[in-house]
Amino acid sequence: MTRTKSLGGLILPVALLFIAAHFTFTAVHGDYGLFQRVQIEADAARLEAQLAAISQDVARMELLTHRLSDAFLDLDLLDQQLRDVLGYVRADEIVLP
């Protein structure tokens, strides 16, 4: 009888220990755990840096678009675009292949 009582008294603490271990493991490694949070924060920082780079590109494009608009015509930029896109050269220039 003492052996049955001691075995029965051991089942509950072992079961509680396994349950606590499961919840601890889930809190660290689960979908909403600590490791996942660190990964999400790293992804957020990477995406914020990418957003800043894209915002700079958009601002540069807006400036170039404004410089080519009818209200503000930059002749140097127009000349550069003609050379790049259409391949124009002036009569006094030498073209090297």
Image (tube, rainbow, N blue to C red):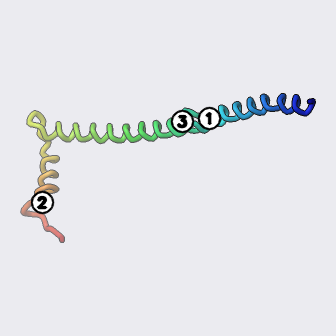
* Residue at 15% from the left image edge and 51% from the top image edge: 81
The structure residue drawn at horizontal position 27% and vertical position 39%, both measured from the top left corner, is 58
Q: How much space separates mark 1 and mark 3, taking CA atoms?
A: 8 Å
Locate the C terminus by quadrant.
Answer: bottom left
Q: Is residue 29 left or right of residue 48?
A: right
Q: Secondary structure at mark 3?
A: loop
Residue tagged 3: 31
Check the image and report above or below for 82 versus 67. below
Q: Earlier in the sequence, mark 1 or mark 3?
A: 1
**Where does residue 39 sit, x and y in percent of width and height?**
53, 40
Amino acid type at circle 1 is Thr
Task: Identify residue type, mark 2.
Answer: Gly
Mark 3 crowd level (few <14, some 14–19, many ≥20, 10 Å Cα) = few
Whole-angstrom CA distance, mark 2 to mark 3, is 56 Å
The answer to whether 21 appears left or right of 80 in the picture is right
Question: In which quarter of the view is residue 4 placed?
Answer: top right
Q: How many marks?
A: 3
Which of the pair 90/37 is nearer the observer? 37
Q: Quick one: label 1, few (<14), some, or many (20+) residues within 10 Å?
A: some
Label 1 sits on a secondary structure element that is: helix
Residue mark closest to the camera, 2 vs 3: 3
